[in-house]
Amino acid sequence: MSLSDAYQDVSQPVKDFLSRGHHQLWIDGQRTASIKEATIDVCDPSSGETIGSIAAGDAEDVDRAVRAARAAFEGPWSKWSPYERQRLLFRAAELVDLRYDDLAQIESIDMGAPISRVRASKAGALRMIQFFAAMALNIRGEALQSGLPGDVTAMILKAPVGVVGGIIPWNGPLNGQWWILGALLATGCTAVLKPAEDASLSVLWMIELLHGLGLPPGVLNVVTGRGSEAGEALARHPDVDRIAFTGSTATGRRIIHASAVNMKRLQLELGGKSPDIVFADADLDKAVPGAAMGVFANSGQICYAGTRLLVQRGIVEEFTARLGGFLDTLRLGRSLNPETQLGPIASERQFERVVSYIEIGKKEGAHLAYGGAPGRNGPGGGLFVPPTVFTNVHNDMTIAREEIFGPVVAVIPFDTMDEAIAIGNQTEYGLGGAVWSRDISTALSVVKRIHTGVMWVNCYGLIDPLVGFGGTKMSGYGAKGSEAHLDTYLYSKCVYIQG
């Protein structure tokens, strides 16, 4: 496949990868065509240009991949020691360190994240891999003094659950896949990954590169395709032991229902409508850019984005004015431009969704204070939505209740701490949130009373895999990061020895 002039500045490995044109499935250690040979176009959201295609895998392809994963789990992979798995993770960290810029370029082209943002995420990816490498030697059971009569020794061992189905979202698959990959390689599970049809390329390339490190065939498999076909088949497959899913709450519900086939274990990171609470005593020099990028980073396409911006009434006007001034400094543009800070929306479907919510906000009486004029720029029409700020928003408005997943924020005024907490908790979601105040006792009071899986104080979006994060209410359940994350890839095996 010949590439347009727009991609002539990317690295040669990226050119070679894109020049394949069609990207096949990865099953049992090799690229392979889908059984029905159906395809899905891959488009660059910065330009609308079609840059290739991926295989549209279905239930038959998922079954092939699951059988390969099961064979690897029962076969050679089961004989690898924790030290060997840790050594593989160390080598994976070296590989990612070496090839990250190539992978970042693919990610930027495929889903539209600004290349500067993706490159800045390298340290986070390496931290995740290093965390899981350390945990590979930290899987511990217990030896217990049995209360049974006779000479009985009792033990609790930790064993890998088996085959894991990993359903990866489109808003950051390059790093997001490592929440699954790291745990698999540390514990000895195997996997079938189903990346989003809107952003599959970085996952396909990552798995191919990892197999170059000597990974046994079948340990990691990738079936690209539509969620309604490949994703549904993976969730329902009777030989998949666990599903790790990041995506919408509606899809999460369907996965819960599908998991009943064989009582799969689930880890679900779902939607969010996170409150970002700014008190009058906050340091606005930090709070304004911090809260802004808590929404507009990745063009608002982050599950824990602080899209409900609660501002104490006495500073609403000043805060909003400063927010507009800060947004004036942000550069909206093509994702591969290193000066771009806000890229396009990742897909046509999501672009239309964001535009529809902007229209709903105006119709419901919210004041459009900034942005709100989507455009299609560049050859073929890029999918650009500028950072958009609504003021005079009430928490019962649609734009304050429903997840938009785009660069749109609703500014909601409050008077007292109790009112801010009540508004913050008045949502079905419970994924993220933040509080900005110079008074640490005020901040901690809010932290304790907001019902959410992660809270930030005078910052937004920091994630350490040692601590991790998760959700509550309709934002899902199951940890990402921390020792609890690894435990979900293991089960307890009770052993009794007599004599």
Image (spheres, grey):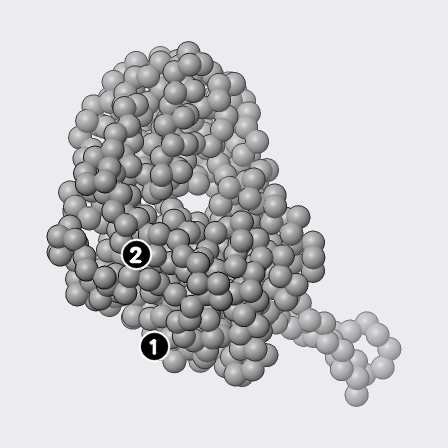
Residue visible at 40% across and 38% down?
Answer: 349
Relative image position of residue 468 (x, y in whole percent)? 46, 51
Residue 453 visible, this angle: no
Which quadrant would the N terminus be assigned to in this image?
Answer: bottom left
Q: Amino acid at mark 2?
A: Gly
- Binning the other alpha carbons within 10 Å of mark 1 as few (below 14), some (14 to 19) or many (20 upward) gives few
* Side (left or right) of 236 relative to 272: right
Q: Position of residue 201 (x, y in %)?
A: 34, 58
Mark 2, mark 1: which one is toward the viewer?
Answer: 2
Q: Which residue is mark 1?
A: 212
Q: Which residue is rendered at x = 45% and y = 79% of the image?
A: 216
Q: Is residue 397 above or below residue 429?
A: above
436 or 173, nearer to the observer: 173
**Quick check: can you spot residue 472?**
yes
Give the residue at x 50% y 26%: 401
| Residue 354 versus residue 234 in the image, above or below | above
Q: Which mark is residue 52?
A: 2
State which quadrant residue 376 falls in: top left
Query: SS of the residue at dot 2?
Result: strand
CB atoms of marks 2 and 1 within 8 Å: no
The residue shown at (30%, 14%) is 317
In the picture, which quadrant includes the C terminus? bottom right
Position of 35 relative to 325 (above/below) = below
Point out the tag, 2 or 1, that comes first from the N-terminus.
2
Image coordinates for residue 242, horizontal then vertical, percent: 59, 60
Could you say where residue 113 lies in the image, as x and y percent from the top left? 28, 46
Report the Cα–Cα distance between label 2 and label 1: 24 Å
Which amino acid type corresponds to the residue marked 1 in the rendered image? Gly
